[in-house]
Each structure stands twice: as C-alpha cells, then as structure tokens.
C-alpha cells in the first residue's frame, strides 16, 4: 500500500503552500559570503596506490567549508582520461560520510570525475564544532542547534556543500561548466539545496528520494528515519518550541531551494517510502523552478528507491542532456 493518500496523478499536482522567511535570500547570501571570505586553500594529495586501484586515480582532498574549516572529500577520475571531465559532486546520506574510495567507483567507471564530499560530524574525516549542541535532544543531527537558523547544523553542512562546488574550479582535470550535484536521501536534499544556492555553477541536479523537504508534512507523516528525531523533540518540548523550531527549519526546506534552482533535474521517489513520504518529495519537485525536470517514480519502492535500476536511468538522462564524458 502506498504511504500517501494521493494517487500518482494527484502527487504530480501536489503544490502545497510553503512560505519562505522574508529574509531567506539575505540569510543565505550572508552565510555564503562569510564562508567565502574566510578563504582557504584547496589541497589534493594523490593516494591511488594506497587503494591498489588500476583503472581509477584517487586524490584525498581538503577544501574550505563553513567558517573556512577544512572539509574532506575524495576525487576519483578514470586513469589516463583526458580532461576536463564532467564531475559528479556527491553528497552522503544521513549519518554517512565519504567512506572509502572503493565505495564510489561507478561514476569513474562511466567516464566521469567524482568529488565525494564528507558530511561534517557524520563522516569520520570532517569534525563539526557542534555549535548549538545544547538542543541536540536525541541521537542525530535533526535538532542540533535548531534554536535558531544561525546555529542550526544544516547551515554548516549546506555551506560545506556549496563550497565543494566552488572547489571544483581549483581541482585537476575537472570541467567547472559541467558540474552535476547528486545524492540520495540526505544527499538528495543537499543536492537540491546547492542547486538553489549556486544555480549558475550547477549544470544538473540528481535528487534521489530526497530528505529535508516540506518539514511540516514530514514531521506529521514520516514513519521511519531521521524525521522521527524531530517528532520526538517536538513531542517532548511541545508546545512552546513548535513555532520556533519550524521557523528555523523554514530556512533549510528543500521546497524553497527548489524554487530557486534552474538546472535540469532528475528526481526519484519511492511511493512506499516511510522515511521520506512521497508528498514531501513531490512538494519540492513540483515547485522546482527549472523547466527541465523529470521524476522517476518507483511504485513499490521504500526508501531504497530504484537501487541500481535508478543508476541506469541517471546515466541515460545525463547523456541526453550532453553531460556525458566524451566517448
């Protein structure tokens, strides 16, 4: 049974009224300007031999993120490929990080470069200084610093992700004019955010079963996953923190970023997803500002979406838009 009351046709028309804060754009302009003003070098150390890979070149990357703090990433490229290559900047799912280079060989096998971005505090290689930790009532990151937009965890993480795209121009063998931002779940939500915050730097957005969209609906309807952290927090502190909590979350809602994103986009959704309920995904998709937008709906899928089948859809979709490597 679908976890949404809406039929697939009704979901395609689902455009809830989700109001952005009046200073939404000013908030993010200030946030990114402050991060960029901190400066910092982009560093890449070749580590291919460490992982015994014969067809892929790997660099261990550090780039300046929030507050100029170093963020870890892997840069993978097909060995011997003549650049500049289109690059897929990949963001991780919830409580994940960049992992190991051997976890990320698909895009280089298809001829792309890939920049795999660590998630501060979630991965092993990029610490989070923990501003606002006093409101982390449960085990995850959903409520860390939720007392105010300035303190909220996702302000730092989303800034890191935009700065990853900034770093592309300083890394070897990459085409800064063909940057694809991609991810699943949390990574999908982060890809939408970067598409909205840096529209002139992004050539395409791949958002699979995206998290961080339409928070109010998600908090009421999600049956699994990180939104339950938010539900538990609000249950414990209700009612006096409900209004202020959602006022903070409004600065980080994928619906608002989608309204500002113009690059071609390919979404996916699992119509039996208990973690990111289908209406939350369609809320962002249907408000997406770019005219070239495609949804892949997997009728019997949960939060795993289309698994490997979805990859084939992505590769074909990118090729049709001239974003495949030269053959």
Image (cartoon, rainbow, N blue to C red):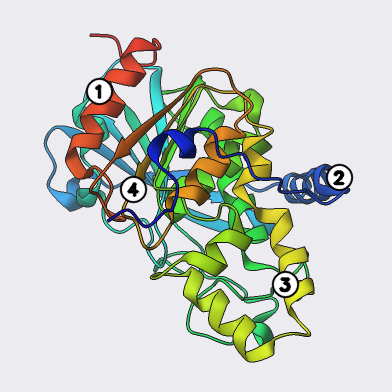
Q: Residues within 10 Å of mark 4 (few under 14, many from 20)?
A: many
Q: Earlier in the sequence, mark 1 or mark 3?
A: 1
Of circles 1 and 2, the one toward us is 2
Q: Residues within 10 Å of mark 3 (few under 14, many from 20)?
A: some
Q: Earlier in the sequence, mark 1 or mark 4?
A: 1
Using the numbered discs, state the Cα–Cα distance from disc 3 to disc 2 in whole angstroms. Answer: 20 Å
Q: To which quarter of the image does residue 3 belong?
A: bottom left
Residue under label 3:
245
Secondary-structure class at tag 3: helix
Identify the residue at image location x=67%, y=38%: 197
Q: To which quarter of the image does residue 163 belong?
A: top right
Q: Earlier in the sequence, mark 4 or mark 2?
A: 2
Residue 161 in the image, given as x and y percentages of width and height: 56, 47
Residue 119 in the image, given as x and y percentages of width and height: 47, 60
Q: Residues within 10 Å of mark 2 (few under 14, many from 20)?
A: few
Secondary-structure class at tag 1: loop
Q: Earlier in the sequence, mark 3 or mark 4?
A: 3
Using the numbered discs, state the Cα–Cα distance from disc 1 to disc 3 in whole angstroms. Answer: 43 Å
Foreground: 243 or 190?
Answer: 243
Q: Earlier in the sequence, mark 3 or mark 2?
A: 2
Residue under label 4:
271
Of circles 3 and 4, the one toward us is 4
The vertical placement of 12 against 317, above or below, is below
Using the numbered discs, state the Cα–Cα distance from disc 3 to disc 4 in whole angstroms. Answer: 28 Å
Say the numbered circle drawn on residue 26: 2
Foreground: 279 or 266?
Answer: 279
Identify the residue at image location x=62%, y=91%: 236
Residue under label 1:
111
The vertical placement of 142 against 161, above or below, is below
């Amino acid at each position: 049974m679908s976890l949404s009351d809406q039929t697939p046709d009704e979901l395609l028309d689902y455009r809830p009224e989700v109001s952005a804060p009046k200073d939404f754009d000013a908030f993010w302009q200030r946030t990114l300007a402050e991060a960029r003003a901190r400066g910092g070098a982009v560093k890449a150390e070749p580590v291919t031999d460490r992982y015994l890979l014969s067809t892929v070149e790997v660099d261990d990357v550090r780039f300046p993120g929030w507050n100029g703090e170093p963020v870890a990433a892997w840069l993978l490229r097909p060995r011997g490929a003549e650049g500049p290559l289109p690059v897929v900047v990949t963001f991780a799912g919830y409580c994940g990080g960049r992992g190991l280079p051997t976890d990320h060989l698909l895009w280089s096998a298809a001829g792309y470069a890939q920049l795999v971005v660590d998630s501060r505090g979630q991965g092993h290689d990029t610490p989070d200084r923990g501003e606002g930790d006093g409101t982390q009532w449960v085990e995850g990151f959903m409520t860390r610093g939720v007392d105010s937009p300035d303190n909220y965890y996702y302000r730092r993480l989303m800034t890191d992700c935009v700065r990853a795209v900034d770093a592309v121009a300083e890394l070897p063998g990459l085409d800064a004019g063909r940057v694809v931002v991609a991810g699943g779940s949390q990574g999908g939500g982060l890809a939408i955010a970067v598409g909205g915050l840096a529209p002139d730097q992004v050539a395409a957005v791949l958002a699979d079963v995206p998290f961080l969209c339409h928070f109010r609906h998600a908090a009421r309807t999600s049956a699994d996953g990180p939104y339950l952290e938010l539900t538990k927090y609000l249950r414990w502190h209700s009612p006096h923190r409900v209004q202020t909590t959602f006022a903070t979350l409004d600065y980080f809602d994928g619906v608002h970023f989608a309204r500002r994103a113009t690059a071609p986009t390919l979404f996916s959704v699992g119509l039996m997803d208990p973690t990111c309920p289908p209406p939350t995904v369609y809320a962002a998709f249907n408000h997406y500002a770019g005219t070239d937008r495609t949804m892949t709906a997997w009728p019997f899928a949960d939060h795993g979406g289309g698994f490997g089948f979805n990859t084939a859809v992505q590769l074909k979709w990118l090729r049709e838009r001239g974003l495949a490597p030269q053959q």
